[in-house]
Image: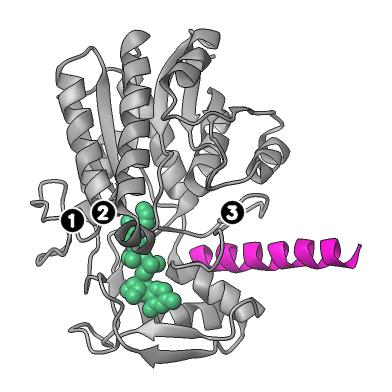
Amino acid sequence: MTKVLVTGGCGYIGSHTIVDLIENGYEVISIDDQSRSTPYPLTGIQLITGKRIKNYKVDLKNFDETLAVFQENPDISAVIHFAAYKAVGESVEQPLSYYENNMGSLVSILKCVKEFNIQHVVFSSSCTVYGNPDRFPVTEATALQPAVSPYGATKQMGEQILRDFSLASNTRVILLRYFNPVGAHPSCLIGELPLGKPQNLFPVITQTAIGKLPKMMVYGSDYKTRDGSCIRDYIHVSDIAHAHTLAVDYLRADKMQNKCEVFNLGTGNGITVLEAIHMFEKVSGLQLNYEIGPRRSGDIEAIYANNEKAIQQLGWTIRYDLEQMMQTAWAWEQKIKKEEDSISKN
Ligand code: WQD
């Protein structure tokens, strides 16, 4: 079996990608220092796939410890690099920790890739690299604007580092630009586990509905959109996950026209905040306690993807619609609450 190293394998997108890789015949190991995650997803992965995933609890910024993982696994054929800090607001408050962590870990893992002459790397990038686009849908050729946060800057720099590395090595690279990943695996055994108070819309909606948050704020209703609230391209995490498996397949099949290729991962549909809330109310049958408030600084008005390149070249398909995204997000929130309640009872 072909072995893939996933960094950040205990995280939200990393854990869903491990499930998809295993279901498509890959052997997987993970490096995750669990500074922003827990071992919990590894149990879910094992329940879904029947496979126990070995996770190395290593700080990727520690080159020697990271290299030791490669020495123990000389048969690694591809690396998928997720591990990074990703809270936009936190990055504004703590830029140095973001640059140190996100860039330091990337350089360290690429030095190992070079040392072991690994030919295939897939990188977790983000639509945030586009900044605040003025034409839609955005394609991979849409000009990047200056990042609107240090988090976004680390994704832009990460792409540049990987582009330069691919030209100076035998390694071919695929950059996957996620739009807004949401939802949970249909088994309800893995999902998003925000640490502390969530910032992203879907977990804020479901935590408000389950009673963990008293109410939620819609950040602005005076944008130039069909209902005044911001537009985003929400995409199910399992669809994002499968795109990573297809990217590894594509690299291994040697189909790359260039040393480094970029793919947008979005549905191509722009959804407003209020439409997402109304979809939740439809799916759950509940009335959500929300208020319209002022805009959140750093928010862009609208963004959604042109995803034709990933569909045509990777053979990617979108399997989950907005209703299923919300259904799985809500089912996961209820499952977590049930587990927390039973723990607090014992
Ligand atoms: C979506 C919309 C908010 C919370 C960020 C990163 C991006 C990616 C996903 C990592 C916005 C509105 C939200 C709330 C609200 N992260 N909202 N009330 O900011 O588009 O993207 O997370 O890869 O890189 O930039 O996602 O879910 O935070 O916000 O009204 O309580 O929901 O204003 O319009 P965002 P989000």
The stretch in magenta equals: 323-346
Using the rendered view, name the quadrant where residue 63 is placed.
top left
Q: Are marks 2 and 1 in contact (CB under 8 Å)?
A: yes
Q: Nearer the viewer, mark 3 or mark 1?
A: 1
Q: Which x, y percent locates residue 322? A: 44, 67
Residue 52 magenta-highlighted: no
Q: Is residue 58 left or right of residue 190?
A: left
Packing grade of label 3 (10 A; few <14, some 14-19, many >=20) is: many
Using the rendered view, name the quadrant where residue 330 is placed.
bottom right
Residue identified by numbered label 1:
147
Q: Are marks 2 and 3 in contact (CB under 8 Å)?
A: no
> Please, what is the dominant secondary structure of the magenta stretch?
helix
Dot 3 or dot 1, earlier in sequence: 1
Q: What label does residue 34 carry, if any? A: none
State the CA–CA distance, disc 3 to disc 1.
Answer: 28 Å
Badge 3 element:
loop
Q: Is residue 259 left or right of residue 154?
A: left
Q: Which x, y percent locates residue 326? A: 52, 68
Packing grade of label 1 (10 A; few <14, some 14-19, many >=20) is: some
Q: Are marks 3 and 1 in contact (CB under 8 Å)?
A: no
Residue identified by numbered label 3:
191
Colour scheme of the rendered structure:
one colour
Dot 2 or dot 3, earlier in sequence: 2
Q: Nearer the viewer, mark 2 or mark 3?
A: 2
- Give the residue type at disc 2: Pro
- Residue 114 in sight: yes
Q: What label does residue 150 carry, if any? A: 2
- Give the residue type at disc 1: Ala
Residue 343 magenta-highlighted: yes
Q: Name the residue at 20% across, 40% down.
A: 157
